[in-house]
């Protein structure tokens, strides 16, 4: 299996396809062993690099505490180990927080930047603190999580098949948040709660696409707007969905592909 020793830890990674590199930084609790839906808009059109973040999946779990700078340095060290000196980057949710720190602290590593359903952090613009969910009883935990994923959940006026699928996966014990509570996840949630890139964002020089769902309560639209306000060369696009808008609105991945294809 593909591992590299980077930034003092053993990191598991996967590479798919050929072409210009695209680093995918995933969200809270993500594990590359979990099923992943195909994305025809980017699959086999880029050299896609995915990895398990510290403490998650098959990557080593170093001693805490973890910082957002640690996560960004892990990503930069992985790229260096793979001899990739310049790449497009897409960060989703927690991965978007990591991507902000990566772009600000290692600017030469990044070409174009995509920040999806994420937040700049700080007191006023943090994503919802997911530690508030994991200690609730299972039935309340699932309902709370689905409502955060999409504010329309539970309304008879809207059919939300993606949310129904997530509810089914959670009820069958699949290894997705919040079912996968491990030491690494708890360390990640602690670092996530301290994320604050407000003072770093103006240092990001890259062409940046900020995308999110109009009904997301994890990373609400005002947080996306703040990212757009603070990153100089950025644009904001909202889609019909919640935190899982990239599965809910087919236009989202098309927008990503179009952005990456522009010179």
Image: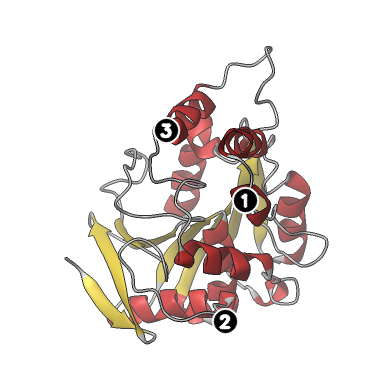
Relative to 220, is 250 above or below? Answer: above
Q: Which residue is mark 1?
A: 135
Residue at 25% x, 48% y is 44
Crowd around label 1: few <14 · some 14–19 · many ≥20 (10 Å): few
Q: Residues within 10 Å of mark 2 (few under 14, many from 20)?
A: some
Task: Name the mark on residue 169.
Answer: 3
Residue 99 seen in the current view? no
Q: Point out which mark residue 105 bears.
A: 2
Q: Residue placed farthest to the front in the image?
A: 137
**Secondary structure of the residue carrying numbered label 3:** helix
- Pinpoint residue 41: horizontal percent, then vertical percent: 37, 40
**For the residues carrying marks 1 and 3, which lies nearer the camera in this image?**
1
**Marks 1 and 3, how far apart in space?**
19 Å
Quarter occupied by residue 199: bottom right
**Residue at x 78% of width, y 49% of height:** 222
Res. 63 in view: yes
Give percent across and percent down for residue 156.
67, 12
Local packing at callout 3 (Cα closer than 10 Å; few below 14, some 14-19, many 20+) is some
Which of disc 3 and disc 1 is earlier in sequence? 1
Q: Is residue 160 above or below residue 225?
A: above
Label 2 vs 1, first from the N-terminus? 2
């Amino acid at each position: 299996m593909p591992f590299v020793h980077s930034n003092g830890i053993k990191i598991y990674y996967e590479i798919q396809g050929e072409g210009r590199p695209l680093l995918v930084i995933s969200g809270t609790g993500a594990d590359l062993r979990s099923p992943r839906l195909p994305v025809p808009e980017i699959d086999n059109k880029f050299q896609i690099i995915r990895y398990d973040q510290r403490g998650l999946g098959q990557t080593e779990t170093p001693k805490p505490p973890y910082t957002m700078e640690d996560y960004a340095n892990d990503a930069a060290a992985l790229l260096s180990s793979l001899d990739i000196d310049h790449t497009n980057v897409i960060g989703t949710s927690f991965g978007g927080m990591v991507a902000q720190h990566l772009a600000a602290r290692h600017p030469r590593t990044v070409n174009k930047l995509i920040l999806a359903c994420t937040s700049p952090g700080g007191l006023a613009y943090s994503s919802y603190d997911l530690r508030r969910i994991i200690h609730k009883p299972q039935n309340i935990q699932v309902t709370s999580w689905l409502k955060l994923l999409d504010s329309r959940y539970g309304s008879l006026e809207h059919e939300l098949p993606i949310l129904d699928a997530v509810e089914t996966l959670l009820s069958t014990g699949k290894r997705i948040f919040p079912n996968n509570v491990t030491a690494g996840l708890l360390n990640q949630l602690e670092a996530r709660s301290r994320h604050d890139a407000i003072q770093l964002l103006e240092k990001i020089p890259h062409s940046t696409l900020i995308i999110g769902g109009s009904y997301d309560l994890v990373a609400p639209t005002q947080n996306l707007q703040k990212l757009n306000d603070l990153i100089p060369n950025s644009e904001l696009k909202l889609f019909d969905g919640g935190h899982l808008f990239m599965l809910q609105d087919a236009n989202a991945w098309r927008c990503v592909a179009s952005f990456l294809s522009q010179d």
